Image (spheres, helix red, strand yellow):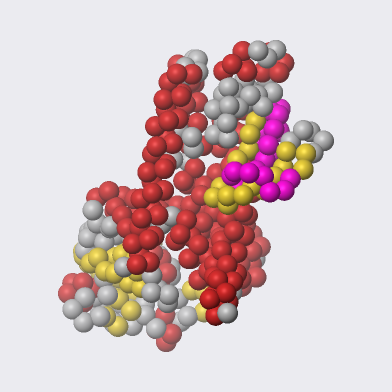
């Protein structure tokens, strides 16, 4: 009985939140492709959330088959003239179509229409993230703290260069800052990289050059991550922790900024990983997403929505990678076509798609291995 209870607890606590979040993100992503394609005059044959056998679905008046499929690891929109769900053009079918019919295919549409249709998926994910963040900021306000040093960790980088309690951080590498969160965000993504910290002390501004140390921290669930640290601490009395109410327009702007922070943070991490300043074991796959979904579900709807927004940005960025079979790969092929004045040949496209698929599968295997290693480590 306890075993059965544990199984149902796992399904309800981890798998269900994962399916709900991923299905929402996939639906919005594919809806971007669908709407842009329909607007461009391209026929849509199928709209699927999930891969594999169809579980349930219906066909609308335009001939599009809307369905939910058995494997909840993504989804696709299949356009008229596509050879498969990756939107590879079916050369044999295209050759047999009339000019009017070709104009209704993705491969036969004008170049700019193809580019808009492909780019609309990732853009939809970014818009969803902005919307979620904006709603959260509009309803809950924005938590802020002043960038005031309350104390220093003994032996820290900041202490060694001469930072003192009471100093107010005003700039990082010349960029003006207003909140302590900006300090944490900037420093955490720069382990072992020189940073110029400008502080206000009394009536003077002083510059301090320092190199954040790489440190491993853990969240409340024990998940570890690598960050840069300089050892400054703030508190309620010094930082004046508070919640600032935002107008709807301000909330949208903050949602846009928060989405931008995630994008720049992702690129910062990739750069640090390539340079060896951060380990690649922080890359997560489906298992990690399942775990994170379950963990956030225990913290409530707000935490789950925040995770959904972060994952939406990640999904958009992943699909913009310049890898064939992904949206970014298609855009690269379209860019080559724009320069050459003619499409890349079917043979070259086939090779590119095979290489791209191998790259994506390798990345998934690597990320899943990281997930499993983290769980059993």
Q: Position of residue 37 (x, y in %)?
A: 66, 33
Above or below — where is 25 with respect to 113? below
Is 199 covered by the magenta stretch? no
Query: Residue 253 sits in which quadrant?
Result: bottom right
Q: Position of residue 237 (x, y in %)?
A: 42, 87
Above or below — where is 197 with respect to 78? below
Asked if residue 339 shows in the view, the reply is no
Left or right: where does residue 134 sit relative to residue 373?
right
Name of the residue lying farthest toward the front:
1
Give the residues drawn in magenta, as a range.
Answer: 34-57
Q: Position of residue 57 (x, y in %)?
A: 74, 45
> Which of 193 and 302 lies nearest the eye of the viewer?
302
Left or right: where does residue 153 sit relative to residue 38?
left
Above or below — where is 115 with respect to 254? above
> Which of 24 and 136 lies nearest the eye of the viewer?
24
Query: Which residue is drawn at the image coordinates 46% and 23% (left, top)?
Result: 349
Above or below — where is 4 with respect to 261? below
Q: Position of residue 318 (x, y in %)?
A: 46, 46
Asked if residue 226 shows in the view, the reply is yes
Q: Quadrant of the N terminus?
A: bottom right
Q: How many marks?
A: 0
Query: Residue 168 sits in which quadrant?
Result: bottom left
Name of the residue lying farthest toward the right:
61
Query: Which residue is drawn at the image coordinates 65% and 30% (left, top)?
Result: 79
Query: Residue 228 sits in which quadrant?
Result: bottom left
Query: Which residue is drawn at the image coordinates 43% and 20% (left, top)?
Result: 348
Query: Which residue is drawn at the image coordinates 31% and 68% (left, top)?
Result: 377
């Amino acid at each position: 009985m306890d075993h059965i209870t544990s199984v149902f607890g796992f399904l309800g606590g981890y798998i269900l939140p994962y399916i709900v979040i991923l299905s929402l993100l996939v639906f919005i992503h594919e809806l971007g492709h669908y709407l842009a394609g329909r607007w461009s005059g391209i026929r849509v044959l199928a709209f699927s959330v999930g891969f594999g056998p169809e579980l349930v679905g219906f066909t609308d008046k335009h001939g599009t088959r809307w369905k939910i499929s058995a494997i909840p690891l993504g989804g696709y929109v299949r356009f008229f003239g596509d050879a498969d769900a990756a939107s590879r053009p079916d050369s044999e079918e295209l050759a047999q179509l009339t000019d009017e019919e070709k104009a209704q295919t993705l491969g036969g549409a004008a170049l700019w229409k193809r580019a808009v249709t492909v780019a609309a998926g990732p853009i939809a994910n970014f818009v969803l993230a902005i919307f979620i963040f904006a709603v959260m900021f509009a309803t809950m306000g924005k938590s802020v703290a002043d960038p005031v040093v309350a104390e220093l960790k003994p032996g820290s980088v900041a202490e060694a260069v001469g930072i003192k309690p009471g100093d107010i951080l005003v700039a990082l590498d010349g960029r003006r800052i207003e909140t302590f969160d900006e300090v944490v965000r900037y420093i955490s993504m720069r382990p072992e990289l020189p940073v110029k910290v400008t502080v206000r002390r009394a009536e003077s501004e002083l510059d301090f050059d320092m190199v954040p140390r790489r440190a491993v921290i853990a969240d409340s669930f024990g998940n570890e991550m690598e960050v840069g640290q300089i050892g400054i601490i703030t508190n309620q009395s010094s930082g004046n922790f508070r919640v600032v109410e935002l107008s709807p327009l301000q909330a949208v702007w903050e949602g846009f900024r928060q989405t931008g922070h995630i994008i720049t943070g992702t690129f910062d991490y990739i750069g640090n990983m390539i340079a060896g300043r951060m380990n690649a074991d922080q890359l997560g796959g489906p298992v990690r997403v399942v775990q994170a979904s379950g963990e956030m579900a225990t913290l409530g709807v707000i935490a789950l929505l925040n995770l959904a927004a972060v994952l939406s940005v990640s999904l958009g960025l992943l699909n913009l990678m310049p890898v064939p079979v992904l949206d970014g790969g298609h855009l690269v092929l379209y860019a080559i076509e724009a320069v050459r004045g003619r499409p890349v040949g079917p043979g070259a496209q086939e090779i590119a798609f095979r290489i791209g698929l191998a790259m994506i599968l390798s990345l998934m295997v690597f990320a899943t291995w990281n997930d499993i290693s983290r769980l059993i480590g």
